[in-house]
Amino acid sequence: MMLQTMMVAALLVSGMGVALLGSVKVALAHKLGIDETRVGGLVSLFGFTLIPVILTAGFLTDLVGRQVVMVSGSVLFALSLAVLAAARSYLAALAAVVMLSGGWALMINVGNVLTPVAFQPAGDSQGEGTAFATNLANVFFGLGAFLTPMAVVSFVHRLGLGRTLRLLGGVTLVPGILALAVNFGAIQPGTATGAAQGGALLTDPVMWLCGLALFFYGPLEASMAAWTTTYLRDRGSTETRAARLLSGFWLAYVASRLVSAFVLLRVSETSYLLSASILGILVLAHLVWSPTRKLDALAVLAAGFVFGPIFPTLMAVLLGHFPAAVHGRAVGMLFAIGGVGWALIPIFIGAHARSHGVQRAFAIAVAAAVGLSGAAVGLLLTK
């Protein structure tokens, strides 16, 4: 029970981490006297730092221990928010973001590794419920990301930015404190076998196909988060309606993970992944080439429902393929490969949007969805 409690706390905090910079960027820019370009640099730094750090975190999870990594990530996350709260210069904010990325990477790596153990369905002794576990766990992650912007706006208004960040820093210590009470010895696999098998990750086609899938999927999620409101405003929606539809996107995103957790107890992960990828192409194609806006709201909600289960189902394929002793390194490699696409493709979409508008720029997202479908076909053929 303590493991599940710790994991729920860790997932909520991890979800908070991915939404935090976007939630405080306006208040932070005002405090530091910086423009949107430099704020964007902070957000980009988080993503680029993540690539090498999460790969390192994978080795630490497997070879040093899951408890050490969870506690360290929790503490580093809290320290990063304390530094950001005290920051009086852009350089100090940059240092805080590097620490934030490091703490988040440690927590996200060990959190994904522990998910099949913590949320294994009753009676599943063969690991057949991994997709159930990963989708259910990511419901909590999604809730953390969804609730953070609303909570931050409320707290900043009442307490100010510095106190809000220190308060959130205290919250990020909760998973680390709970981790100290978990008996990790009962769930930690042997590391000697893992060390021997770690090199095989580089030559396993499933590893590269999963990484390629995340390479193409990450930008889809990031693009919908970044440009949905702009797209809808360009198509004639009001600011209020666009904001509500973006919230609807995230609610559909979380709800689909809960639904998929139970569906995937009876359906193949790879076939489900391929089906969702193909539906993603259709939804995005509508956003790009539809001449009218009659179905725009439905398309945005459908995108949330289609995209929601893709990442956790992909994670289930990865964790189900490799032995537990190398799960940390497998997750680290997945994010390292996928993070490149996550960082670069939105840059191309943004540049194209400046020249031709968001609607036409989403054609790049359609191409990414096609690439995701190709990777899903490859995974289906390897099973």
Image (spheres, grey):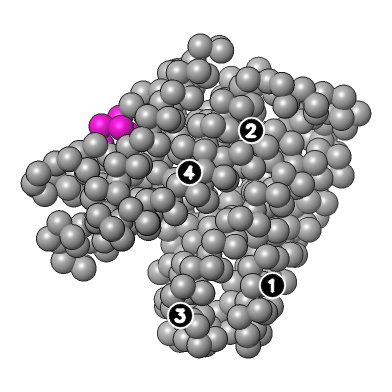
Tag 4 residue: 218
Q: Earlier in the sequence, mark 4 or mark 3?
A: 3
Q: Considering only order in the chain, which callout, 1 or 2, is on the residue closer to the N terminus?
A: 1
How crowded is the residue under tag 2: few (<14 C-alpha within 10 Å), some, or many (20+)? many
Residue 288 in the image: state x and y as whole percent. Answer: 22, 43
- Kindly identify which numbered label has been placed on residue 95: 1
Badge 3: residue crowd in 10 Å (few <14, some 14–19, many ≥20): few
Q: Amino acid at mark 2?
A: Pro
Q: Which residues are magenta?
A: 279-283
Q: Are marks 1 and 4 in contact (CB under 8 Å)?
A: no
- Quadrant including the N terminus: top right
N-terminal label among 1 and 4: 1
Question: Whole-percent x and y of residue 364?
Answer: 35, 42
Disc 3 vs disc 1: Cβ atoms closer than 8 Å? no
Regarding residue 256, the answer to whether it shows in the image is: no
Image coordinates of residue 251 in percent, x first then y, are: 34, 50
Taking the view exactly as shown, the residue that stands out farthest to the right is 192
Q: Which residue type carries mark 4? A: Gly
Is there CB contact under 8 Å for labels 2 and 4? Answer: no
The circle drawn on residue 116 is 2
Name the amino acid, label 1.
Ala
**In front: label 2 or label 1:** 1
Q: CA distance from mark 2 to mark 4?
A: 22 Å
Residue depicted at x 78% and y 58%? 72
Q: Residues within 10 Å of mark 1 (few under 14, many from 20)?
A: some
Residue that appears at 43% across and 85% down: 157
| Vertical order, 65 against 162 (above or below) | above
Question: Residue flagged by tag 3: what amino acid is it?
Answer: Asp
Up/down of 91 relative to 135, above or below: below
**Which residue does the image show at 37% across and 29% down from the upper left?**
370
**Which SS type dominates the magenta stretch?**
helix
